[in-house]
Image: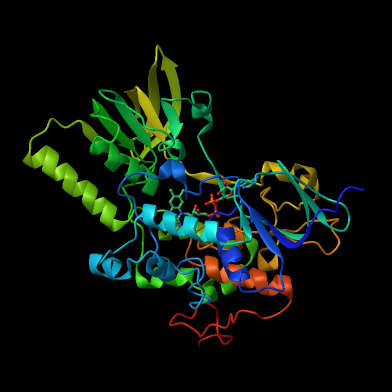
Amino acid sequence: MADTPELLDLAGIGAGPFNLSIAALADGLPMLSTRFFDRQRRYVWHEGMMLPDTHLQTGFLKDLVTAIDPTSRWSFLNYLVQHRRFYRFLNAELSTVSRAEFSDYLRWAAEGLDNVWLDHRVREIDHDGEHFQLKTDTRTFRARHLCLGNGKAPWLPAFARAHQGERCLHAESMAWRARDFTNQRMVIVGGGQSGADIFINALRGHWGPLRSLHWLSRRRNFQPLDETAFTNEYFTPGYTSQFAGLEDEVRRREVNAQKYASDGITPAALTEIYQTLYHRFDVMNEPRWAHLLPHREAIDMTCDDGVFMLQARHGTTGVLERFDADVVIFATGFESSLPECMAPLLDRIQRDAHGEPSMGQHFMLDWQGGGDSRIYAVNAGRTRYGIAEPQLSLMAWRSAVILNHLSGEVHFDLEDDAGPVTWTPQGRESS
Ligand SMILES: Cc1cc2nc3c(=O)[nH]c(=O)nc-3n(C[C@H](O)[C@H](O)[C@H](O)COP(=O)(O)OP(=O)(O)OC[C@H]3O[C@@H](n4cnc5c(N)ncnc54)[C@H](O)[C@@H]3O)c2cc1C
């Protein structure tokens, strides 16, 4: 008789930072059997965007565990101590940690945690009425509950999809391999942090000296990330909890208005870009081959004889402009998507009025037909839980919410003192 597949309390699809944080906190809860599967053989955080001189937008104390359990061995500080560089880290007085160092911290945790299994792509998930059945390339597992942590998929405008290839690509694949764009005309589309990271590297000649560089943004300007104190209140458990209780349409309106709390460019990167442009083109008098073009919406692209012709509409005048390029990079963001392995269960997952998987309390998807089995999802509830949901800031707190709920016990204290801002009405109208 074939062996019965192992039964887990929680199976995680993906071990990016969000599920890795759950794995790290669950490491201290031996009564729960958890396992997180990731298809990566060699763990790198967003490898395709691992460009030189790129940094976290978030403080390093917002690591996998510290906000909930600073005594956990999986903290960033313990990573520094274990790698014998605590004092040098302090002496370096870094205002932000490099993405390379944070990625190495995540790798250290992923490789050290027994409940994280790398090189295991989950191919298919079904439910037999009692448990989930997960198939990887080599084995089958059963699980009482799931946590989807497969991340987001790169998003390209429809007109660009047919042109995808070695010279028309999404930002997320830029660092997959060494590229040489010497003497080519490059256009970057997208005015967020990824666009800025690519622009600064292109300016420095990371892909060889370019003939020209144009950076288009639909935004009115190259907008900064708002990381001031009261904006950072959005990234607290208290704000998130009250946000989750608002009406659906109100939440959507609010989260859209908070865009630059998470989607702007760090002030440090903007200053660096400006200073580099000033030095090269104003002081050293290089011919001006790099151009910044805000308030341009890319609307179409054709390709003739290897040359891309990108059309953009100017935001204030409506004038159409054409940019000819040999290389076009789309730094146009990411979209949520359920992983392909969930195909057998897709029609049982409820959708909201906007067609997105409907998310209830405790980061659980609404779904039918699974008895007591729950599907938790991380990085999938921006309109349910707010602007912090796709960010690192509250990942440890969210992990603790999920683990407390999963186990039915308060393993982690989630009580939070009231902050300085009163977000909700106080019950009495002022006269
Ligand atoms: C370049 C970049 C920089 C960012 N920098 C910051 C920052 O500084 N601060 C901040 O707060 N936020 C930042 N973010 C936003 C966010 O914090 C990250 O995207 C974060 O990595 C999201 O974590 P995740 O675990 O949801 O997804 P991901 O990191 O995308 O991880 C998903 C994982 O799932 C695995 N996977 C997918 N499908 C399967 C499957 N079927 N089987 C097995 N494994 C699977 C993948 O291999 C991957 O490892 C950044 C985003 C990007 C793109």
219 and 105: which one is in front? 105
251 and 327: which one is in front? 327
Q: Is residue 380 above or below residue 51?
A: below
**In the drawing, does residue 42 fall left or right of residue 367?**
left
**In the drawing, does residue 136 fall left or right of residue 423?**
right
Q: Position of residue 78 (x, y in %)?
A: 43, 70
Residue 125 visible in the picture:
yes
> In terms of image quadrants, where is residue 396?
bottom right
- Give the mark count: 0
Q: Position of residue 239 (x, y in %)?
A: 52, 73
Q: Is residue 332 above or below residue 80?
A: above
**In the drawing, does residue 154 fall left or right of residue 420?**
right
**In the drawing, does residue 95 fall left or right of residue 157?**
left
Residue 243 visible in the picture:
no
Residue drawn 61% across and 51% down? 14
Return the residue found at the far right.
1
Return the residue found at the far top.
305
Residue drawn 70% across and 56% down? 358
Q: Position of residue 337 (x, y in %)?
A: 63, 46
Residue drawn 69% across and 63% down? 34
Residue drawn 34% across and 23% down? 325
237 and 74: which one is in front? 74
